[in-house]
Each structure stands twice: as C-alpha cells, then as structure tokens.
Image (cartoon, rainbow, N blue to C red):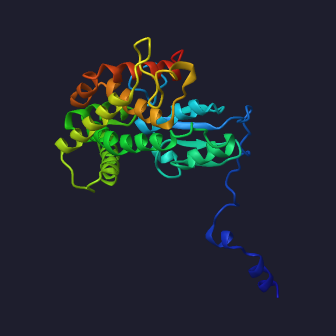
C-alpha cells in the first residue's frame, strides 16, 4: 500500500531529475507612461537627403503627404524593416485601438475617420486618370531606375541597407530587389516582358502629360495638377494624383544615384522641377 502511494506522488519532473518549474519568473511588462493617442504611420527611412523628413520610398512618401493633405492628426515613424508590417510592405498605420492598416486599406481608414474626400464636380475621373497614368507609366521606370540599374542598385544597397551587417547586407537587399522586380512585372501593361528602352519611353510620355497639364499662374509658377489659373494657390487643393506625382518626382530628383537618365528626363522640364519644389514647401513648410 505504501509503495503504491509513493508511486502516485512521484511526478514526471522527479523521474527526469528536473528542478521545480518555472526556473525563473519575470514581472509583467509595464504599460507605457505615455499612452498612444494618435495613429502612427510607419514609413521607410532614412531620407535620401540627410535631416529631411521625406521617406526614401516613393510609395511611403505618397501616403506621407496624402495623410498631411487630408489633415488627420497622426505621427510618423521611420522603420527600415518592411517585415514589421503584417503584409510585409510599407507603409502601414497602427491606431491607438490596436488596429493596423496598409495598402488600399489606408484610404479606408481615412474615409472612416474623416469621411470621403470631397472632389470638385467633374474632377474625380481626371484625378483617377492621372493617378493611373503615374502608377502604370512613371512608377515602373522609377522602380527600374532604383532597383534594376546595376550602378544605382549599388548605391541603394549602401544607403538603404547601411544598418545591416556587411556580411548579410547584399543578400537582404537582393531579396528586396526581387520583390520590386516582381512588383514591376505586375504593374507593367505587357506583363513581365519589358525592356529598359520601353520602360523609359513610357516614363517620358507620363512626364510629358504632367508637363502639359500643369497650369502656369500669374506669378509664373505652376499650381496643382487639377487646378486652373484662377484656382491657383489657396483656392486649389492637391489630390492623391499630386501626392503620387510629388513622391515620384522628388525621389527622382533627390536620390544621389550613379545613373541619372531618369533624372535628366525631369530636369529638362523646368515646370516639373518647380512643381516639385513648391509641393515640398507646401507639405513640409519648416522642413518638418
């Protein structure tokens, strides 16, 4: 009888000679002293230009200025890891109620928080047309310019991958390049079949369309894409097409790359340079 009682009180830890578990206890994590009160937009950093607030990723930059355009209260946080997002892509938005939004869901959040963006009658279709033009003709060239041009990619590896140890930097950035090449293939109208010449020819057409659409005001400076000479300045508001145009043009003009073919295509159109400079001052008036 006694033997059976000893057998029942012997645990598996005793039989394996293990000490009592847990081996160590730690206190529960403390709650932050500063509760999160505003949504936070996580964007790719650092900037191409030191000490400036613009994201180095054109997609992140377009959403960065679009959030500023919509006038919602939010904070910005640079990150170097796209894997921080649930989708593996930047940007993404984290809200105080522990929700995350990325991709087109970002617009859904803005509409939920602020209501749908009011667009002047007759301008909605034109805004969509320009956004599509930029996304399908200028963006592929920018992706190719950054990630497929060998000399430019070497600069991207050193600038955007500088925080990685040198032994793994190249392999990590090669993975990023493959992701962007797949993105380019998905965007390109002809599927995965494209040439360098075709990509830059399409970009030139998009830049020409932007140049033709911008209206010169009485002061000799261009307004927003959908504004007229009378609506220039405070009477005109940027649309998401302006955010895309600025993001792509600003990246093209400021990225210190080795091959400058795409940049030269923009520089030969002074109105696009002026437009980009004015847009920067509008969204980042104090360089903040």
Question: Could you tell me which quadrant the N terminus lies in?
Answer: bottom right
Left or right: 165 as drawn, with respect to 118: left
Left/right placement of residue 276 relative to residue 92 reads left
Quadrant of the rendered structure where residue 250 is?
top left
To which quarter of the image does residue 197 belong?
top left
Q: Is residue 153 left or right of residue 64?
A: left
Task: Work out whether 105 lies above or below 201.
Answer: below
Quadrant in which the C terminus is drawn: top right
Tell me if 274 is positioned left or right of 198 in this view: right
Q: Position of residue 280 (x, y in %)?
A: 46, 21
Q: Position of residue 134 (x, y in %)?
A: 37, 40
- Pinpoint residue 48: horizontal percent, then vertical percent: 38, 26
**Residue 74 drawn at (x, y percent):** 63, 33
Q: Nearer the viewer, residue 258 or 204?
A: 204
Vertical side of 248 occupied by 182: above or below: below
| Residue at (73% x, 35% y) in the render | 35
Q: What is the total number of numbered labels drawn onto the structure image?
A: 0
């Amino acid at each position: 009888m006694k033997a059976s009682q000893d057998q029942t009180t012997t645990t598996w830890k005793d039989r394996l000679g293990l000490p009592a578990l847990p081996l160590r206890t730690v206190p529960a994590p403390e709650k932050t002293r500063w509760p999160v009160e505003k949504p936070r937009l996580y964007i790719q950093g650092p900037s191409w230009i030191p000490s400036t607030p613009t994201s180095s990723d054109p997609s992140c930059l377009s959403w960065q200025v679009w959030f500023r355009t919509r006038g919602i209260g939010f904070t910005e946080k640079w990150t170097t890891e796209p894997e921080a997002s649930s989708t593996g892509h930047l940007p993404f938005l984290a809200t105080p109620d522990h929700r995350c939004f990325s991709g087109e869901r970002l617009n859904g959040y803005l509409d939920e928080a602020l209501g749908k963006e009011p667009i002047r009658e007759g301008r909605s279709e034109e805004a969509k047309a320009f956004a599509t033009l930029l996304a399908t003709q200028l963006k592929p060239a920018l992706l190719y310019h950054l990630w497929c041009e060998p000399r430019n990619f070497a600069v991207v590896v050193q600038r955007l991958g500088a925080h990685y140890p040198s032994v793994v930097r190249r392999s990590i950035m090669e993975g990023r390049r493959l992701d962007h090449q797949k993105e380019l293939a998905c965007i390109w109208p002809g599927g995965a079949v494209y040439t360098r010449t075709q990509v830059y020819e399409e970009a030139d057409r998009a830049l020409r369309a932007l140049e033709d659409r911008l209206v010169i005001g009485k002061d000799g400076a261009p307004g927003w894409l959908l504004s007229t000479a009378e609506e220039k300045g405070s009477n005109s508001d940027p649309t998401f097409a302006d955010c895309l145009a600025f993001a792509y043009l600003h990246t093209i003009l400021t990225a210190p790359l080795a091959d400058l073919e795409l940049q030269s295509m923009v520089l030969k159109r002074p109105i696009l340079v002026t437009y980009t400079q004015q847009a920067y001052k509008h969204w980042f008036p104090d360089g903040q």
